[in-house]
Amino acid sequence: MPTRRSYFTELVVGVAGVLAAGVGAWMYYVPADWFLGGLAEGWYFGMFIAAGLLLATAFGLFARMTYVDDRAYTTPVVVSTILALAALGGAIAFAVILII
């Protein structure tokens, strides 16, 4: 039974991931004398981890729904699966760096 595809969910999760990555990149350049400057070191790692997880979820949802619609491993399914795995790998790498 085919599932109902929600482009809105994919779009919201993807945009949230891109925004989280943007905030993480911005936090990397926050000056130390800013009132939250002491938190800046961990914030951008946390935002990059959140962005990686959100983007992995968005690309994974897209890959799954495209696979359900096409019933085959087409180029969009394979590319979005690779992007989801790359985003998840990036989130794991930043989590390991944050722990170390």
Image (cartoon, rainbow, N blue to C red):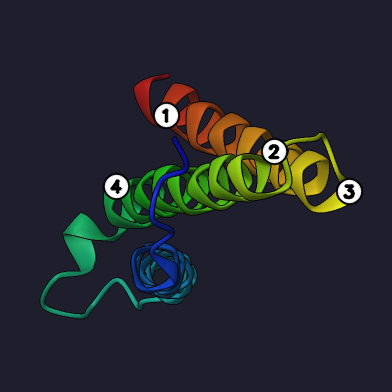
**Up-down: is 84 above or below 6?**
above
Q: Are marks 1 and 4 in contact (CB under 8 Å)?
A: no
Could you tell whether 47 is left or right of 48 in the image?
A: left
Secondary structure at numbered mark 4: helix
* Disc on the earlier residue, 2 or 3: 3
As measured in the structure, the alpha-carbon distance from the residue carrying label 4 to the one carrying label 2 is 29 Å
Q: Which residue in the protein does label 4 denote?
A: 42
Q: How far apart are the alpha carbons under marks 4 and 3?
A: 37 Å
Q: Residue 25 location in percent, x, y?
A: 49, 69
Amino acid identity at mark 1 = Ala
Query: Which SS class for mark 1?
Result: helix
79 shown above or below 97: below
Spatial CA span between label 2 and label 3: 10 Å
Q: Return the residue at label 3.
A: 75
Query: SS of the residue at dot 3?
Result: helix
* Left or right placement of residue 11 versus residue 68 in this view: left
Q: CA distance from mark 3 to mark 1?
A: 30 Å
Tell me the mark number nearer the camera, choosing from 4 and 2: 2
Q: Nearer the viewer, mark 4 or mark 3?
A: 3
The residue that appears at 38% across and 55% down in the rendered structure is 4
Mark 2 highlights which residue?
Answer: 81
Q: Earlier in the sequence, mark 4 or mark 2?
A: 4
Q: Is 88 left or right of 3, judged from the image as shown? A: right
Checking the image for residue 95, the label placed there is: 1
Q: Earlier in the sequence, mark 2 or mark 1?
A: 2
Q: Are circles 4 and 3 on residues that touch, CB within 8 Å?
A: no
Q: Residue at x 42, y 19 (%)?
A: 100
Q: Nearer the viewer, mark 2 or mark 1?
A: 2
Using residue 74 as the reference point, say whether residue 25 is left or right of it.
left
Dot 1: few (<14), some (14–19), or many (≥20) neighbours within 10 Å?
some
